[in-house]
Image (cartoon, helix red, strand yellow):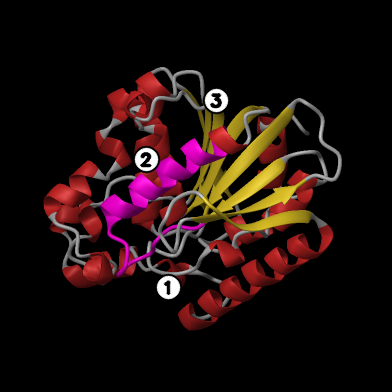
Amino acid sequence: MRDWREMSRDELETQFSPSRWSHRMSADDVIRAHVDALRAGTEKARSVTQTLLDVPYGDGDGEKLDVYVPSSSSPDVPLVIYFHGGYWQFLSKEESGFLAVPLVQRGVVVVAVGYSIAPKGTMDVMVSEVRRSVVSVVQQYSHISALYLCGHSAGAHLAAMVLSTDWTQYGISPPIKGAFLVSGIYDLQPILSTYVNEPLKMSEEVASRNSPSHFLSQLKLSSASCDIIIAVAQNDSAEFRKQSEEYFRALESLGLNVSFQDVPDTDHFNIIEQLVDENYHLTKLLLKMVGKS
């Protein structure tokens, strides 16, 4: 496949428009169906689990968490933090509890993170917020035995930036034992000239300092003992698939404990939507990662 630098703006926009690649329905319909599925899953999770909604982790309007709590908790409680997708400009924590039911039923706490999406939030702000959300979770839930990150699309990018954090600046060392990165973007440079960047207004410098692929040595320092799964959909675009494959190979070359999942019969949207199903392949892998399979 050609390097992205050789592509026209139109070609890049096609490659980085996930809705154009779904085989199930039209681009507009697949986005509508995605939002509906996430909302329905979140509503169900809120109706059948104990919740703590709008828990602040900072002073900003968007700096809030939703916490889904098991009815009976042992002292050895794992916690999954979920960062939503939406190209850093869409969706919120209000649609991000959909994956909670299979996890909470097995004694796992699930935290859905809100952050200040564009245009209100810049990329620097969002990365800072999600890092501080992890600090806050560690401080509020000091009894947790292990922390796991999960993110989809833009949320996988943010989770990867969390993995690349120099925690000495925060005075803590979060017990992050695993990360589940689904259909993510790990190099922001190719989207600079596309519609995705219009509300973000990233410069080359901003894109560079917020690209997980540029912080591999820091990730190795911060996440050497972390179990990382990188998943991509069969019907993700070639560029999305390439980003996941290259990030996987980079982490593998560092000797990290990383595996790659190419999920058949999925697109950019239903690869994550299906986490509502305890029998779905990725749900089983996530449960296994957190020690609850």
Q: Earlier in the sequence, mark 3 or mark 2?
A: 2
186 vs 205, nearest the viewer: 205
Residue 49 at x, y = what percent? 80, 55
Residue 231 at x, y = what percent? 52, 44
Q: Identify the image quadrant of residue 165.
A: top left
Question: Above or below — where is 150 with respect to 46?
Answer: above
Q: Main secondary structure of the magenta part?
A: helix
Three-letter code, disc 1: Arg
Q: Nearer the viewer, mark 3 or mark 1?
A: 3
Q: Measure how far apart labels 2 and 1 are at the Cα level.
A: 27 Å
Q: Is residue 35 visible?
A: yes
Three-letter code, disc 3: Pro
Magenta stretch, residue numbers: 114-138
The residue labelled by disc 1 is: 20
Screen quadrant of the C terminus: top right
Q: Label for residue 175?
A: 3
Residue 137 sits inside the magenta stretch: yes
Q: Secondary structure at mark 2?
A: helix
Question: Above or below — where is 62 with respect to 131?
Answer: below
Q: Nearer the viewer, mark 2 or mark 1?
A: 2
Residue 255 sits inside the magenta stretch: no
Three-letter code, disc 2: Met
The residue labelled by disc 2 is: 161
